[in-house]
Amino acid sequence: MTKSAAEQYAIRPIGIVGKKDKRAFVEVYPEYEEALSGLNQFSHIVVLYWFHKNDAPDKRKTLKVHPRGDPSNPLTGVFATRSPVRPNLIGMTICELLFIEGTALYVDRIDALEGTPVIDIKPCISRLDLVSRLRAPQWAEREREKKEND
């Protein structure tokens, strides 16, 4: 397979992740305020962000990791993990949208550091996003069980 002529893409942040008083939010830049119209009608959103703290050539070459940084988990290809170390540093979290205040989207949680550049926001739509028969390896199920017990 040959690479296309357009190998370079420009991704520009549309906001940043913020955390204040134990509350997580996405602060959308003012020039994108109109793009938020109608978003308050959704209970959940998908937030895509850039793992900016891992943006180094050597980390982009890493193709296998121990999931969750736990050496007891098997060495796994990065495309089968949510690792921040990967060829393209795109992260994703599905968040419950609690409320919108101006251009700040307050969410229940987000798996990103404060100051992380947000590259896109999408609404969750059950017909498109609901997975009825989810299958995952044992290490991922252990992670789910840990979260449920916390």
Image (cartoon, rainbow, N blue to C red):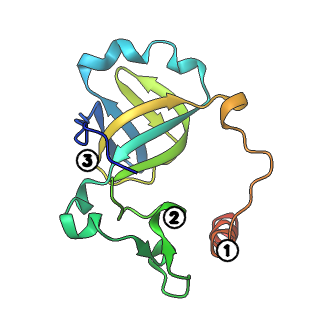
Could you give the CA–CA distance between mark 3 and mark 2, rounded to whole angstroms? 23 Å
Where is residue 3 shown, x and y percent of the image? 32, 46
- Using residue 129 as the reference point, say whether residue 109 is left or right of it: left
Where is residue 90 shown, x and y percent of the image? 37, 49
Residue 61: image quadrant is: bottom left
In percent of the image, x 66 and y 65: which residue is there? 144
Instruction: Kindly identify the amino acid type of the residue bearing the numbered disc 1.
Output: Arg
Instruction: Kindly identify the amino acid type of the residue bearing the numbered disc 2.
Output: Thr
Q: Earlier in the sequence, mark 3 or mark 2?
A: 2
The residue carrying pointer 1 sits among few (fewer than 14), some (14 to 19) or many (20 or more) residues within 10 Å by Cα, namely: few
Given residues 17 and 87, the one toward you in this image is 87
In percent of the image, x 31 and y 54: which residue is there? 51
Query: Could one spot residue 49 in this view of the protein?
Result: yes
Where is residue 54 shown, x and y percent of the image? 26, 62
Given residues 50 and 30, the one toward you in this image is 50
Q: Which residue is mark 1?
A: 142
Where is residue 148 shown, x and y percent of the image? 69, 64
Could you give the CA–CA distance between mark 3 and mark 1, rounded to whole angstroms? 30 Å
Local secondary structure at mark 1: helix
Q: Which residue is mark 3?
A: 115
Q: Are marks 3 and 2 in contact (CB under 8 Å)?
A: no
Give the residue furthest to the left.
56
132 in relation to 62, above or below: above
